């Protein structure tokens, strides 16, 4: 017996209200007032979820949105994934209905491309747990958030100075792409740093204007915010365990912070933007160097490490290896690498650090 189809509509958009990428497509549907017969929105849960075989057949990355084309199409395509691809397909399919979303203005494509390459690829830094790092090119949350904020400022520079929308007086695909992501930014960035506005000034004015005075974007705002507040925040307490939001480094500073700041002297043997290495003032071997991360970033001791610290811990070990190969520092054939942890481990300074010891044959540990 044949399975009952999920819908008899021309298209099914598999999406959920919280999806900022799916909201780009939903804005087009709402603006063009497409009927449910033309495009019906159905949750991916109806297929078993984002990681189900059924959904992965439509969207191999397991990401929303996905679109099935249920009527015969000249391209022979039966489904599409990725929001920009879906959006441009629907704009072509329903070109005679509602706004074009494609004004004669290169700003729209510039903003869309910048958004898709440099913002959405790292937006997970605002809400994903440490186990999902690295995100994009960024090994830790702090650097990813900084990059995210930088890209918002770059996009602000692409905006038109006139009109209600990003390209002027006409709504564009740029508005549909960027507005939902700015909902995320406006709500989530203050959880990490509330000392500055989450959006750059011109971008904030545009964002506030659309959510207040444009009925479609007001609807998008409510769809996303309802889920963020009631499900992510109030029900699941998503940010309680996320580093720099619910979890922060509140331990007191140490002497190492003063060495990094050059407030007290040290015999520095290696330094870059991430690590600092200097001779131990109470050496336990002829050659004894400490290697520390410049930014403690919660690593008071090694047991505090998470996937977000993978990069810096690797840097400590690589720096330690380079130091142990430096005969001018007194190292010979090998070295001992030690990280003390906690009282039982003999840790004295609560800023994670690697001891590199050598210069003679060392005895057994114990």
Image (tube, rainbow, N blue to C red):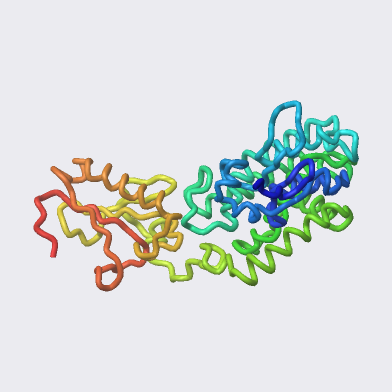
The image quarter in which residue 104 lies: top right
The residue under the point 82% across, 46% down is 29
Among all residues in the image, which is located at the extreme top?
Answer: 74
Pick the residue in front: 176 or 205.
Answer: 176
Q: Position of residue 325 (x, y in %)?
A: 22, 41
Q: Position of residue 262 (x, y in %)?
A: 41, 56
Can residue 283 be seen here? The reply is yes
- Please indicate whether residue 344 sits to the left or right of residue 141 in the image: left
Can residue 258 be seen here? The reply is no
Q: Quadrant of the C terminus?
A: bottom left
The image quarter in which residue 290 lies: bottom left
Q: Is residue 235 above or below residue 142?
A: below
Q: Is residue 142 above or below residue 238?
A: above
The count of marks equals: 0
The residue under the point 29% across, 66% down is 341
- Please indicate whether residue 115 sits to the left or right of residue 132 in the image: right
Q: Position of residue 75 (x, y in %)?
A: 72, 27
Q: Is residue 91 above or below residue 209?
A: above
Q: Position of residue 126 (x, y in %)?
A: 60, 56
């Amino acid at each position: 017996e044949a399975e009952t189809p999920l819908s008899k509509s021309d298209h099914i958009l598999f999406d959920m209200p919280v999806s900022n990428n799916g909201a780009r497509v939903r804005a087009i549907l709402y603006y063009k007032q497409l009927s449910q017969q033309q495009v019906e929105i159905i949750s991916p849960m109806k297929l078993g979820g984002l990681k189900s075989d059924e959904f992965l057949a439509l969207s191999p990355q397991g990401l929303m949105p996905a679109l099935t084309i249920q009527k015969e199409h000249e391209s022979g395509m039966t489904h599409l994934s990725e929001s920009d691809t879906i959006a441009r397909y629907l704009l072509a399919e329903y070109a005679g209905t509602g706004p074009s979303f494609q004004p004669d203005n290169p700003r729209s494509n510039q903003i869309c491309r910048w958004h898709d390459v440099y913002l959405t690829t790292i937006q997970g830094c605002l809400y994903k747990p440490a186990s999902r790092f690295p995100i994009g090119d960024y090994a830790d949350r702090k650097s990813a958030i900084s990059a995210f904020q930088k890209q918002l400022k770059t996009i602000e520079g692409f905006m038109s100075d006139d009109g209600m929308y990003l390209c002027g007086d006409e709504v564009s695909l740029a508005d549909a792409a960027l507005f939902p992501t700015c909902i995320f930014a406006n709500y989530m960035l203050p959880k990490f740093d509330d000392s500055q506005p989450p959006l750059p000034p011109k971008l904030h004015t545009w964002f506030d204007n659309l959510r207040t005075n444009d009925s479609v974007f007001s609807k998008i705002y409510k769809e996303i915010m309802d889920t963020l507040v009631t499900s992510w925040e109030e029900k699941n307490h998503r940010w309680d365990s996320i580093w720099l939001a619910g979890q922060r480094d509140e331990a007191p500073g140490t002497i190492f912070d003063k060495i990094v700041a050059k407030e007290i002297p040290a015999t520095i043997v290696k330094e870059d933007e991430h690590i600092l290495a200097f001779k131990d003032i109470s050496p336990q071997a002829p050659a004894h160097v400490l290697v520390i991360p410049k930014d403690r970033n919660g690593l008071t001791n090694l047991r505090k490490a998470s996937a977000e610290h993978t990069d810096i811990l690797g840097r400590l070990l690589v720096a330690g290896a380079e130091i142990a190969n430096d005969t001018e520092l007194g190292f010979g054939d090998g070295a001992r690498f030690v990280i003390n942890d906690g009282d039982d481990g003999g840790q004295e300074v609560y800023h994670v650090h690697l001891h590199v010891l050598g210069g003679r044959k060392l005895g057994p540990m114990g």
